[in-house]
Amino acid sequence: MPGGRRGPSRQQLSRSALPSLQTLVGGNCGNGTGLRNRNGSTLSLSAPPITALITPEPVRHCRIPELPVDGNLLFEFLFFIYLLVSLFIQYINIYKTVWWYPYNHPASCTSLNFHLIDYHLAAFITVMLARRLVWALISEASQVGTSSMIHDMALILARLVLLTLCVWVLCWTLVNLFRSHSVLNLLFLGYPFGVYVPLCCFHQDSRNQPLSTDCSYLVQDQLVDDSASGVGSLVKPKDLFSLLRESVKEQFNPSVTTPTHSCPLSPDLIRNEVEGLKADFNRRIKEVLFNSLFSAYYVAFLPLCFVKSTQYYDMRWSCEHLIMVWINAFVMLTTQLLPPKYCDLLHRSAAHLGKWQKLEHGSYSNTPQHIWSESTIWPQGVLVRHSRCLYKAVGPYNVAVPSDVSHARFYFLFHHPLRLLNLLILIEGSVVCYQLYSLLRSEKWNHTLSMALILFCNYYVLFKLLRDRIVLGKAYSYPLNSYGLKAH
């Protein structure tokens, strides 16, 4: 309008309305990006890096008390006793008789049909279940006493006698089983080992990253190997015999070395530590799964394979006993191989790793966005672009790769330190409640006896889990700081 007061031009208005980068959360152009205008182009502005604008507060961890954990030898002994009790219960379910009938209608004079039981099969199963206990005895004996020539000779002699006895009993039972059973039944004896070799021996991901007590172990190995070969592999591929030898050693040697956490400040060291912990955790879970299935197979399934066709037994109850043995063995092995100290270690590493939440395209269009950098510790709430996707920082410390699903899974599992413990309590508590219900509804003597014996073992496991949950719940219930982490 002529003579009227003109307002600022569009170009002047856009320049004057541009906010200062110092007032933006994570406003950074040093990472190769800036603010986006309506046309989609980027305004190239000079600004200090994001770590200079907002510095994340150092991660603080809560100290947990030292909780009592069963020793290796004690746990293997208790686990072996539990498996023997479960095997005895399965034989009761299969070969029970009606011995309470009056004498004028005698059905049997004993509670079990002992003449139908294959004692060679029972001895074979006992030796297979005792393999971990035997190796634990040998390992504990090697660490006791002073090193001398007499002690070493006596230890070597005891090892030879013990191993020779186990091998002799195993061969004696196998020879007698070959004489009295068909080849098809004998294939069931070594079925778990036939499945374990192709599934576990040929996967080298967990063995390529040996876990050490120092957080910089992977970086040093990778630098040496990269300079020599120029590739990212850490260890040369192993041959078949080496993999088989290591797999057999893992199954016979139940001892596990617990790593440590040193609060690394470098993003590369944090990611390398997480990779090592992931490999160690996967190895432990693999051992738990295999040994729990191995125990349930030899305790509850293998006796069913050698039952004569004329022998009647309750199939539903025997299969239910098989499931219960597998669940209880899984919980017992998980509790031993993943103690509270180890779960706290995983929680501390997850607190340093952080998490990224993937956002939809078009959301947060007016918020400053940055190009993700592997050498930057990103604060909470910042938006980054990685692999043509938009991500938002969730944790107070964020050094994870946004597109790496394993990092997100690691943070989800161990960000809450009591998540795994709560899951074990839920599983074991559900099993105990179901067994109590079955005990109240049972009408047969073998059902009542089997539930009563198994419940005694489950009470001990549930007691340890509830004790750890109560103590750790109080330890982690201290006030939080502004970043949501536990303070000292």
Image: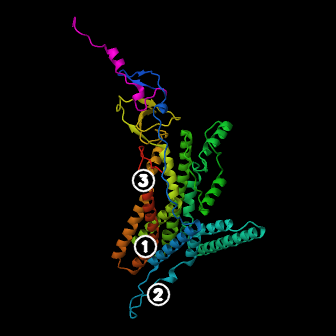
Q: Which residue is mark 2?
A: 110
Magenta run includes residue 233: no
Q: Is residue 371 left or right of residue 230?
A: left
Quadrant in the rendering for residue 136: bottom right
Color style of the picture: rainbow
Mark sitting earlier along the chain (2/1): 2
* C-alpha distance separating marks 3 and 2: 61 Å
Q: Residues within 10 Å of mark 2 (few under 14, many from 20)?
A: few
Q: Residue at x 53, y 35 (%)?
A: 375
Q: 407 or 369: nearer the eye?
A: 369
* C-alpha distance separating marks 3 and 1: 35 Å
The part of the chain drawn in magenta is: 1-30
Q: Residue at x 46, y 62 (%)?
A: 468
Q: Is residue 210 left or right of residue 6?
A: right
* C-alpha distance separating marks 2 and 1: 26 Å
Q: Which residue is mark 1?
A: 455
Q: Residue at x 51, y 70 (%)?
A: 299
Looking at the rendered structure, the secondary structure element under dot 3 is: loop
Q: Residues within 10 Å of mark 3 (few under 14, many from 20)?
A: few
Q: Which residue is mark 3?
A: 478
Q: x and y percent of residue 44 in the render?
A: 45, 21
Q: x and y percent of residue 215 in the render?
A: 59, 46
Quadrant in the rendering for residue 477: bottom left
Q: Tell how many labels.
A: 3
Q: Is residue 323 above or below residue 352?
A: below
Q: Is residue 295 above or below residue 26?
A: below
